[in-house]
Image (spheres, rainbow, N blue to C red):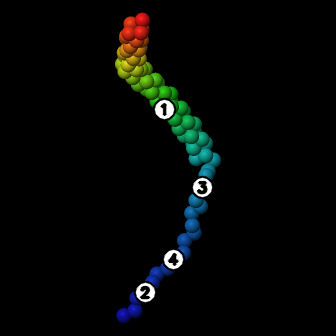
């Protein structure tokens, strides 16, 4: 028995099909996406500032204070030893 191959030719759909009503809707969606991205950037910046302020207050300020005290203590020890 012989095999049968069925071949059908169909017209290819265009890769980019834009109609007037869809184009307007696409512009509105693109504008909404731009607003969402902008809002995301602002929210991310606020969160970053919140984290950086917290790290600065809880870690860097005490470290700077302790470092300053140590420098003052060792400078006093040197002045007493030499003077």
Q: Nearer the viewer, mark 2 or mark 1?
A: 1
CA gap, disc 3 and disc 4: 23 Å
CA gap, disc 2 and disc 4: 13 Å
**Is disc 1 surrounded by few (<14), some (14 to 19) or many (20+) residues within 10 Å?**
few
Closer to the chain start, of discs 1 and 3, is 3
Q: Give SS at disc 3.
A: loop
Q: Give SS at disc 2.
A: loop
Please state the horizontal and vertical placement of residue 60, each as a whole percent of the image.
Answer: 40, 20
Q: Which residue is mark 2?
A: 4
Q: Which residue is mark 3?
A: 17
Q: Quadrant of residue 28?
A: top right
Q: In this orientation, which residue lies closer to the viewer: 27 or 46?
A: 46
Q: Kindly indicate whether the residue at mark 3 contacts the one at mark 2 (C-beta within 8 angstroms).
A: no
> Residue sitting at 49 percent across and 79 percent down?
7
Q: Nearer the viewer, mark 1 or mark 4?
A: 1
Furthest residue toward front: 82
Q: Which residue is mark 1?
A: 40
Q: Quadrant of residue 80?
A: top left
Closer to the chain start, of discs 2 and 1, is 2
Q: Which residue is mark 4?
A: 8
Q: Give SS at disc 1.
A: helix
Q: Give SS at disc 4.
A: loop
- Above or below, 54 relative to 33: above
Please state the horizontal and vertical placement of residue 11, each as a whole percent of the image.
Answer: 57, 69
Q: Kindly indicate whether the residue at mark 4 contacts the one at mark 1 (C-beta within 8 angstroms).
A: no
Closer to the chain start, of discs 3 and 4, is 4
- Above or below, 47 relative to 70: below
Whether residue 16 sits left or right of residue 3 in the image: it is right
Residue 61 in view in this figure: no
Q: Nearer the viewer, mark 1 or mark 3?
A: 1
Q: In this orientation, which residue lies closer to the viewer: 34 or 27?
A: 34
């Amino acid at each position: 028995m012989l095999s049968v191959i069925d071949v059908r030719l169909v017209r290819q759909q265009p890769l980019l099909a834009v109609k007037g009503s869809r184009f307007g809707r696409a512009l509105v969606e693109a504008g909404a996406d731009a607003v969402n991205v902008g809002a995301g950037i602002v929210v991310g910046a606020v969160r970053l500032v919140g984290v950086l302020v917290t790290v600065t207050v809880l870690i860097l300020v005490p470290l700077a204070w302790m470092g300053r005290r140590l420098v003052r203590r060792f400078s006093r020890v040197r002045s007493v030893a030499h003077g």
